[in-house]
Image (cartoon, rainbow, N blue to C red):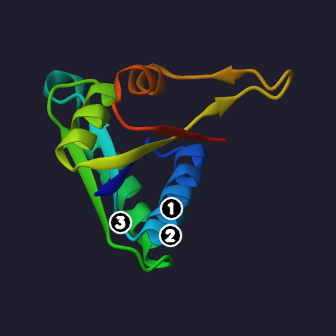
Amino acid sequence: MSIVVGLDGSDRSFRALRFALEEGKLRGVKVYAVHSLFGGDRTDMGDIERGEKILEEARKIAEEYGVEFEAKMLIRGKSPGEDIVEFAEEVNAIMIVLGMKRRSLMEEVILGKAAKYVVVKAKQPVVLVK
């Protein structure tokens, strides 16, 4: 069993990571942080380097929690939402954690394409972290 958290480098995704790490510690399960890229001509070396920096930051944060952790870059020709859902199945995840956007004017929740896909398609519970 495990928890999967999607990372895009935003503050909200790192808040989601911290939540996932707390849950992993409480439940005694491994946490996977994933960063997804499309690959092919839709991905360049700059994208890969940014992804590596995001995952390295995730590793540093995870060290504070003392939980089993693995950071993975997924470049499988799929959208981030598809990658997260499929990866969660592959690692027998008990939940998926994502950061969510929020507009301050009326606290209107805005989900990105990846989050919408995950919420609709995932078999596991999906936690959205503000």
Q: Quadrant of the C terminus?
A: top right
| Label 1 with label 2: CB-CB less than 8 Å | yes
Residue at the image point whose x is 50% and y is 78% from the top: 64
In the picture of the structure, the residue carrying the numbered disc 2 is 26
Sequence-first disc among 3 and 1: 1
Q: Is residue 65 above or below residue 89?
A: below
Residue at the image point whose x is 33% and y is 44% from the top: 35
Q: Quadrant of the N terminus?
A: bottom left
Q: Which mark is residue 23?
A: 1
Q: Is residue 30 visible?
A: yes
Q: Amino acid at mark 3?
A: Val
Q: Amino acid at mark 2?
A: Leu
Q: Is residue 45 visible?
A: no
Residue 63 place in picture, x, y as percent = 43, 77
Q: Is residue 31 above or below residue 84?
A: below
Count residues near mark 2 (Cα–Cα under 10 Å), then give few for <14, some for 14-19, many for 20+: few
Residue at the image point whose x is 39% and y is 20% from the top: 117
Q: Amino acid at mark 1?
A: Glu
Please, what secondary structure does the residue beneath circle 2 have? helix
Q: Nearer the viewer, residue 42 or 15?
A: 15
| Label 3 with label 1: CB-CB less than 8 Å | yes
Q: Is residue 18 above or below residue 119?
A: below
Count residues near mark 3 (Cα–Cα under 10 Å), then give few for <14, some for 14-19, many for 20+: some
Q: CA distance from mark 1 to mark 2?
A: 5 Å
Q: Which mark is residue 98?
A: none
In the picture of the structure, the residue carrying the numbered disc 3 is 29
Please, what secondary structure does the residue beneath circle 1 have? helix
Please, what secondary structure does the residue beneath circle 3 have? loop
